[in-house]
Image (spheres, rainbow, N blue to C red):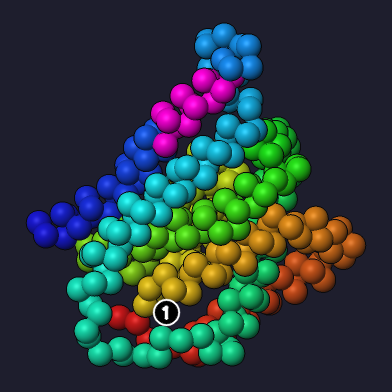
Amino acid sequence: MKKFGYFIKSLFPVVMVFILQIVAAIPTMVYFMLKSSENGSDFLSGLTGLTNNLEYVQTLNIVYAILALFVFGLWYYRVFVKPFRNRPKKQPGGYSFHTIVSIICLGIGLQYVTTLLTDALGVLSPELINKYNEQMSAQGYDNLSVMLLIYSILLAPIVEELVFRGLIFRFARHAMPFWFANILQAALFGFVHLNLVQGIYAFAMGLFLGWICHRGRGIKYSIPVHIVFNIIGCLFSGLIELTLTLNFPLFTGLGIALTIFALWLFYTDFQSAN
């Protein structure tokens, strides 16, 4: 019964994600509708035009992320940090040279892995990829703004690691073995992206990040891996695609080899996690 309780707790952060998005949307929506009214537009037209307003979408992301950082950060601290502060550490908690190299290599390698997954989906269903590209364009990823960069590179990785590897994974580990808990948090990570293409590569990425969290005993290492991954995705995704276009077999092999090497490097830095 206690394990079932932890399983239910592992699902609740996902519910909170959607609740906080609604809470963040209300004041942001009101602000932009009032702003639209001041510019001469009527209230209803201001409301209907919000979904196509990039400034609104990106501001909403920032408002949600700040709210989520406070809620999930406090939740994670009170449940999984504060009660264990005085316990002796079972392994080093810093960033060794090997760990830093593995974080960078894994961020780059995962970009190759997820790009390969996306390209495979494109072969199987071009319409699906076209729809995905349209969604990314609608969010402003064709012309990155400062707000979008702050959200994508810094805020989103921290919030997502707090939610999925920090809370969901840790609660689930009290209810089930590692790999079941890891698959659960990765599946939920894919689900909240609410589109199939992002969901598939987020699931794959979530499995890697869950293992990093498990091996490193916390989100201290999964956060920078996620940040590096998003930096590459936002600023250098074209370079990844270019290398695959120039020599697909070579750079596919290099990307996979880099991922395996980074995992091995990270593995050797830490004692086995229970």
Q: Is residue 169 visible?
A: no
Which residue: 81% across, 61% down? 239
Residue at disc 1, secondary structure: helix
Q: Main secondary structure of the magenta part?
A: helix
Q: Amino acid at mark 1?
A: Gly
Total numbered badges shown on the rendered structure: 1
Circle 1 sits on which residue?
A: 216
Q: Residue furthest right?
A: 246
Image quadrant containing the N terminus: bottom left
In depth, the one of 133 and 82 nearer the eye is: 82
Which residue: 62% across, 63% down? 229
Residue 57: give x, y in percent of width and height: 57, 34
Q: Residues within 10 Å of mark 1 (few under 14, many from 20)?
A: many
Which residue: 43% across, 30% down? 27
Image quadrant containing the C terminus: bottom left
Residue 37: give x, y in percent of width and height: 56, 15
Indicate left or right for 168 with 4 as reference: right
Determine whether 199 is above or below 184 in the image: above
Determine whether 51 is above or below 130 in the image: above
- What are the residue bounds of the magenta stretch? 24-36
Q: Determine which quarter of the picture holds residue 191.
A: top left
Indicate left or right for 264 with 14 as reference: right
Q: Is residue 29 visible?
A: yes
Q: Determine which quarter of the picture holds residue 53.
A: top right
Q: Residue furthest front?
A: 38
Residue 175: give x, y in percent of width and height: 22, 62
Which residue: 46% across, 48% down? 65
In depth, the one of 78 and 199 nearer the eye is: 78
Q: Residue furthest left?
A: 1
Residue 67 in magenta stretch: no
Residue 40: give x, y in percent of width and height: 63, 11
